[in-house]
Amino acid sequence: MLTVRTVGRRFPGGVEALRDVSLRLRAGDFVALLGPSGCGKSTLLRLIAGLDRQDSGTLDWDAGHAPTPGEIGFVFQDATLLPWASAEDNVFLPLRLRNVPRAQAIPEVRAALDRVGLSGFEAARPRQLSGGMRMRVSIARALVTRPRLLLMDEPFAALDEFTRHRLQADLLALWQSTGCTVLFVTHSIYEAAFLARRIALMTPRPGHIEREMVSPLRPEPQTRLDPAYAALVAKISQVMEASLGEQ
Amino acid sequence: MIIGRLAPALFGLLALAAWEAAVRLTGVPVYLVPGPIAIVGAFFADPIGLLSALASTLVVTFAALTVAALLGTTMALAMAASRLAQAAIQPWAVVLQVTPIVAIAPLIIVWVGDPFASLVVCATIVAFFPMFANTAAGLAATPADLADLFRLYGAGRWQALWLLRLPVALPYFLAGLRISGGLALVGAVVAEFVAGSGGFASGLAYRILEAGYRLEVPRMFAALVLLSLAGIAINFGLGAIGAAIMRRRGDG
């Protein structure tokens, strides 16, 4: 789907956020960008989303051109919903911005809410919903355009552990049923090990992908009980500490 | 609980009683300090005259508030639309804010000519700044993530303005309206003072001046009380309207 080639990004003021970052994203893959805060994970995600531009290197899309609006879904760390709009109107927003008439969009919007388990909450305002439900609305909004690539920027970091586990399991199911490609930024080793098929370890100052690991686990909720899961977590921790220690 | 609610009213009554008692015990002449009873008496001696004067002042106030709201919002939008407009407008808005209206009111009255229009212009100048500054702050307060979201989905300028920036700015606008409401009243009264008898249909300020010349001090106080009550009503009224709008929208 996308090949990131030796991308660099230096912010005005001189901070070098990314240096020589390369990453291959295959269609249907689930890749976690794992690293400590400030290692440039979010910067890389924003470059891929087209919200920022790299100073060097290239993004080569297999389609030959950058995705059009709607081909990329983006889920932020906060749910970033319009506080005055209902769950339904929030999910409708991406279609509304493409001038899809409401009547035509509503079945699609309802289906997206249903997929994230929020049937019956169409009229609820964000402040009437829990943090986990707000994040579900946000995911439904990202899915409503049927994106080929879903970019997620630490979406579950602010949730409590129980809610996080449920949303992670539901995200795996959504990934399998929609078949879209997911690039998931996280600073949690457990989250990366549970969700991703491939894990790209990033180190900071400047942000760089230190190493990529392939997960031996099956993508299913029971994985958390699998000894292989614990082993993967231990291995990632070891590699991560070794790479960070070198700096 | 009930005592807590009644406390302000009880305190007010107590203060009024103390005032009346002090006036009676010291024997201060009524043309220096009238007691509350004399003030109420002065109101009921000519309720229609005072209330029609209040109505005339309120017409100026609301006309000025409307103009200030429209003008403030328009300028804030212009500033939000372009950095050049922002650089050009902002310093002048501050000049307008710091210029004492009493100093320029005579000029405005001479230049504008029409008494009603000149009062509205003066009151608008006083009411303009909070309207403008609040709305501008609201338009600049769009959360960065939501702005990114709109960009990601290819939203146009007008879509972003209509679906994101204006709704975000609404509570700021309503807060500005509430502040400006009180200021428009103050501006209207100041302008009436400067205009004197030349004012439009003679508002409350003119009644105060007139009563002052005649040493009808209780009537002066009655007019003052009416002004305060009108100011309080405007403040609470606009506050209630704002709260109702936010409640209706579902995020207030």
Image: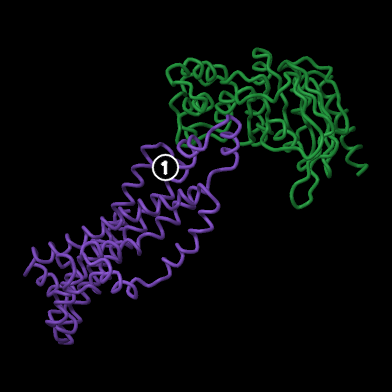
Chain colours: A green, B purple
Residue A80 position within the rendered picture, expressed as x and y whole percent measured from the top left: 57, 35
Whether residue A4 appears in this view of the structure is yes
- Badge 1 crowding class, 10 Å Cα cut-off, few under 14, some 14 to 19, many 20 or more, is some
| Residue farthest to the left, as pictured | B45
Q: Quadrant of residue B192?
A: bottom left
Q: Is A133 on the left or on the right of B71, as rendered?
A: right
Q: Is residue A148 above or below residue B169?
A: above
Q: Is residue A194 visible?
A: no
What element does badge 1 sit on?
A: loop
Of the pair B66 and B110, the residue shown nearer to us: B110
Q: Which residue is mark 1?
A: B252
The one nearer the camera, B7 or A112, is A112
Q: Residue at x 13, y 73 (%)?
A: B37
Residue appearing at x 14%, y 73% in the figure: B39
Report the quarter where the C terminus of chain B lies. top left
Q: Residue at x 31, y 48 (%)?
A: B240
Above/below status of A83 relative to B230: above
Q: Along the horizontal axis of the image, is A9 left or right of A162? A: right
Q: Position of residue A99 (x, y in %)?
A: 48, 24
Please provide percent x and percent y for residue B62.
Answer: 26, 56
- Residue type at mark 1 is Gly
Q: Quadrant of residue B130?
A: bottom left
Of residues A24 and B19, which is closer to you in this image? A24
